[in-house]
Amino acid sequence: MNINLSQLISISQLDKEIDALSPAIEAKRSTSLKLKKQEEKYLKEIEDLNAKIEDANIRIARNEQSLKEHEEALEANLAKAKAAKSDKDLKNMQIDDDLSREQIERIAAEQVELDKRKIEYQESINTIQKQITNLVSDIQEAEETINNDIEEIKKKQAVFYNKKQEIIMKIDKKILSFYEKIKKWAGNTSVVQIKRNACGGCFMKLSDKVCSEVMYGDSISTCPHCGRILYAIKERETETAK
């Protein structure tokens, strides 16, 4: 087999090994990201609950002002009642008093409900904060493990990368450039084996002439259909590999 082709096959296989480890790194990182997203979700829930507490405080303040106004109205009516000169005036004042007392009762009941809700909101916040504390601890432990795992994966990548660089130092630079151009669109299927007289990349049938050139020729051949670099393993090489 052409020495340059043999080197390209090795480079292609090492590229596959290097790239195959990248998803493993992302998978490790995804575990940490999921935990962090959960933390963000908890923080958003706390933010929403605090907004509800603030809204309740605003309504309580408004209600307190309304209570004050109704109580002042009752006091004013009491003073007017002492100076009333007719039953009609007293009756009108009584109606006003009844309306004010109804509003005071309604507002007082609403105040109790708002205070109750504030307590519930705060209890929910306290519960979520405990969950966040536990989650932060989980994230720290997970990241320590994940970082160690990623470091081991990167060490494996480095071994493959160093082997690749050793070959790159020896290979013809024009041939390497040719491979890199194909790799831009073909990725890790830039160098493919002929299987059953078909390209291992696009799977199109190859003529006997092309198969023969790849099998016995000394030059680098490409698929006439897709342009990938082709190689073939002779039966003797296959048996030796076994």
Image (spheres, rainbow, N blue to C red):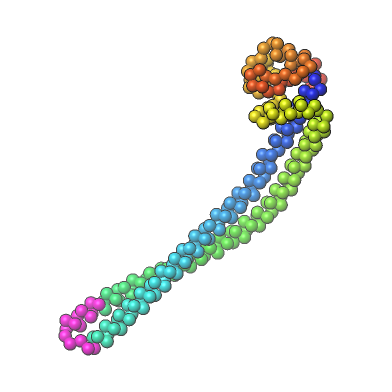
Classify residue 41 as left or right of residue 95. Answer: right
x and y percent of residue 235 in the render? 77, 15
Which residue corresponds to the image point at 67% horizontal and 19% vertical from the top-left?
A: 223
Report if residue 38 is visible in the image: yes
Left or right: 50 with respect to 30? left
**Going by the picture, which residue comes out furthest to the top?**
208
Instruction: Name the foreground residue: 43 vs 178.
Output: 178
Is 87 covered by the magenta stretch?
A: yes
Q: Give the camera-side residue of 173 and 191.
A: 173
Q: Write the residue at 75% across / 42% down.
A: 154
Whether residue 161 is situated above or below residue 2 in the rendered picture: below
Q: At x 32% / y 81%, what residue is drawn?
A: 72
Residue 147 at x, y = what percent?
Answer: 72, 49
Q: Toward which corner of the image does residue 70 lie, by quadrant?
A: bottom left
Residue 10 visible in image: no
Q: Is residue 35 left or right of residue 211?
A: left
Is residue 163 rendered to the left or right of residue 137? right
Q: Tell me: residue 34, above or below residue 132.
A: above
Q: Quadrant of the N terminus?
A: top right
Give above or below for 108 relative to 220: below
Rendered image quadrant of residue 130: bottom right
Residue stretch rendered in magenta on the structure: 82-96
Q: Quadrant of the C terminus?
A: top right
Instruction: Return the x and y of residue 62 as percentages of the image width and height.
Output: 39, 72
List x then y, in percent, for residue 80.
Answer: 24, 85
